[in-house]
Amino acid sequence: MYKQRVELYRALENEFNSKIIAYITSDRPNMGAQIASDVIDFFIDHLDKIGPCERISLFLYTRGGDTSAARNIVNLLRMYGDELQVIVPHKAHSSGTIIALGANEIVMTKQATLGPIDPSLNTDLNPRVIDGRIFPVSVEAVKGYLEFAKDELEIKDANALASVFEKLTDFVHPLVLGEVYRSKAQIQMMASKLLQNQVKDEEQLKRIIAFLCSESGSHDYTINRREAKSELGLNIINPSPQQYEIIKEIYDDINEELMFNSPFQLGEINGAYAVRRCLLESIEGGSDYFSTEGTVERGKIADGKLAIRNQINFEGWRHDFSLSSNVKIVKDVNKEIEYERSDEYQT
């Protein structure tokens, strides 16, 4: 729980000589969460309480989410800190990797992984699966379909290729296809700007972006710290044994609270429930969490079969007021003014 993690955050701040913010989006089966824009105001609140500082360390665990929100988070952190460090205890995939690219350095444990940043689109025009859920459209999947037709099936005739494309548009709306390719160009530009803090060589920068956006082959591909450092050339830092011990202890405590490895099963619940799906924590700002709360009612329908009714009563962010760290916040007023004079992207 947060009350126990506060001292661990304090110890990690001493190790890295920085201010720690932890941002966790759960990947618990049936109750996962993603990086989203609704967290931005909470980041601002934490950063205002921390105030401008020399270094901010973001303790990050996520499987991804909204790319614009990811870039916004990086921009915010850089407006408050001269240097940005991202600490990856386990997973920072997709948009999580985008956040890591915007750091000056990435601290990765032995089990930590990054991932490709090729975009997938979720819009109201996307195809839907049988249960009504939106089917995400990946630019690399579309590209693979067309390349399969041309390269593997060796279709060269223009009319035949047009027919292949028309078949694709029967499943994927043309406007979604256009948006997917537009978002690929956007994410490449975003990655190029973010990487300026780690990579100065232009050719190396292009090679990293090409790999992360397409050459990795699959969005599920994972990149360990050895590959990230030696093959991609990212600024990867190995934690010391003492730092690793603290990072692991924080991660284990969060894992226990959010229950990453225990699927949420409605069939096992009878009555009220509350599930924490995201955490945003700092010593100064306390603990904010995204919660889904509801009530499960059991009954029988006409034929005697068991029926389960799930009533969602609340879904959104809450602040844990019961866990006050009682930290006195002292701000450098002159530095506050200096930062407020500039609205530029801090590098």
Image (spheres, rainbow, N blue to C red):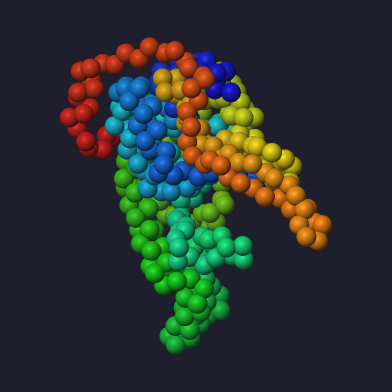
| Residue at x 51% of width, y 64% of height | 141
Q: Quadrant of the N terminus?
A: top right
| Residue at x 20% of width, y 18% of height | 334
Q: Does residue 64 appear anywhere in the picture?
A: yes
Find residue 76 and report its horizontal and vertical position in percent: 33, 35
Q: Quadrant of the C terminus?
A: top left
Front-most of 136 and 235? Answer: 136
| Residue at x 56% of width, y 75% of height | 152
Identify whether 71 is placed above or below 245: below
Front-most of 217 and 232? Answer: 217
Front-most of 249 and 203? Answer: 249
Find residue 18 and report its horizontal and vertical position in percent: 40, 21
Q: Does residue 138 appear anywhere in the picture?
A: no
Apparent side of residue 276 relative to residue 81 in the rendered image (left or right) = right
Find residue 56 and report its horizontal and vertical position in percent: 38, 26
Identity of the residue furthest to the right in this view: 304
| Residue at x 46% of width, y 51% of height | 117
